[in-house]
Image (spheres, rainbow, N blue to C red):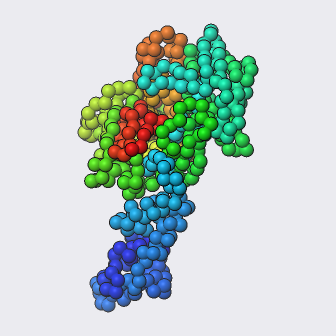
Amino acid sequence: MRYWKSLAFCRDNLQFEQWRPMSLDNFSQSLDCTRRNAQLLIKRLIKERFLEWQPGVGRGNLPNAKLLKCPNERLEQQAFRLLEEGKVAQALLLVKDSHRDNFLENYLAQFQPKDASKHILKIPFYRGTHCLDPVLITRRTEIHLASYLYANLLTINTDHLDIQADLAHSWKLIGHTLEITLRKGLKFQDGSPLLAQDIKAHFERLMSSDAGCKVLFAFIDDVVVIDDLSIHFVSHSMPSLLPKLLAHSAMGITKAIKGEIVGTGPFCLEEQTEWRTLMTINPHYHGFRPWIDGIEIWNIGDKAKNFDLNSHVVHGSHIREGHASGFRAQNQWEEGCVYATFNVNRNGWMAKRAHRAVLQEVLSHMGAPHSQQCEALAVASGMMSSPESLKLSALDLITEHIRSLPMPEAPLSVVTYQLATHIETARLVVESLEKLGIDAKLTVHEYPVFDQLSTLSQADVIICGEVFGEDTEMSWLGWLFNTSALTACLTDKEQHWIKQKCTQAMAQPKLATRLKQFEKIEKILIRKGIYQPLFHVEQDLNISNTVTAPALLANGWIDFNQVVMK
């Protein structure tokens, strides 16, 4: 890749047949290589007749260089090859800024439907999509996409927050048993029939997997197939949770065939690569057909703002200055928050409550990150708290107190994952600790490595985030039971305590009472020095004027089933 970067550097910094001073140090620094490697690259460019080079004569005189032929065609050919390998960010490094829109349009044109009447919703994104198997998904974007690939027996109406039948024709909860009657004529996306035995097979696949959400579904004690169209779910400890469990994303019904996952939702997963995800209409879907014919998500990495004019739905940070006029912004404060967890299972310094209280004090006085990469933030005192104005750093108020306390014997390990707001928050945590004399080191993991307990168990401080959905009750249960960043920091005794408290909460007849119980659990986790809420995030999605779409959902996305393209 350094060869291609060197060719692009020469194109951007030299002129055709005109001598210009060229610093070998600048050349090597731009390629992030040694002077020796830079000299080897220059020799290659000279040999290939792209470059002519004159060494500097006399002390302090720079060498001179000039282009002998234009490298644009060769660079763009290499950029196309890199795109085909899914290396979007590397490809765009080789293309001039002024040419990037046309370059992307020309390349992506080959993927557009041959039928011009097809309406494909195009979305640039900062990363590739991860696993879309509903059993294994943990990230909100993948959960949202999967909701269009896999249908549930029951679903939650986002307007009224009541339970509705989907694959189920009808349902009723009698005592400890939820009785489901399926619709007639249901089919998987491959046209094969969907029967009660398939529902049980999906549940068994879920429970035999490594999915973290299995903890929630362990409340289901039995699944009984009555006949092809009837199936019963039994829970002795928490029967009231059964309808919501069947509406959970992990119960989006699938069939596994030779390693391939076949779905039941309004769209089929036609293609998923590192940099492109394409979903197209499912001809066998049992419900109303969406208006659009497909959804296309591109992994443009940190170059997403080079793609806004070719898109219909763009996150605010990806809109280039001067281009927002073609979009209408939709903003809201998301429920949930960016937070820190403190690993009580780490031996030594972290095991003491007083030491974790020190960390909470530091995080409460560190202020907020101010990088342009961050989303808009507000102070959070809990998952469901009202956003409060950001505070300036006030570390000087606690400096004397912190420095009088015992310090860790080894640097504290602070970990997070590749999301800009979380990275900048974690950097601020490390900087604040070091200002107070507490050594710390930051590690940024990719997904799904970050989400593994084996990774998080080695961390002292974890910076993560949780976004609550329309169903606040299930969001609480999902966070308390199914979040690796929290689970990794709990002892077995505390995990048992959470299960006990949640079971008691769910036994309450009124929703408001149950929600207050969950907030009490959260406050106790703060008092124990296990968890600290930090910031609320403002969701910012921009919709092209060529698209009509509903308001934002709680997860920051829109309902693709309601989109109409003008």
User: In x, y percent, where is residue 506?
Assistant: 52, 15
Q: Residue at x 43, y 83 (%)?
A: 50
Q: Residue at x 65, y 19 (%)?
A: 181
Residue that extends furthest to the bottom in the rendered view of this protein: 57
Q: Which corner quadrant of the image does residue 353 belong to? A: top left
Q: Nearer the viewer, residue 528 or 92?
A: 92
Query: In the picture, which quadrant includes the C terminus?
Result: top left
Q: Residue at x 43, y 21 (%)?
A: 160
Q: Which corner quadrant of the image does residue 451 belong to? A: top right
| Total residue callouts | 0
User: In x, y percent, where is residue 403?
Assistant: 33, 39
User: In x, y percent, where is residue 485?
Assistant: 50, 36
Report whether residue 469 is seen: yes
Q: Nearer the viewer, residue 548 or 439?
A: 548
Q: Which corner quadrant of the image does residue 487 belong to? A: top right
Q: Nearer the viewer, residue 460 or 72?
A: 72
| Rendered position, 160 above or below 482 | above
Q: Residue at x 56, y 15 (%)?
A: 240
Report whether residue 500 is seen: no
User: In x, y percent, where is residue 488?
Assistant: 54, 34
Is 329 on the left or on the right of 49, as rendered? left
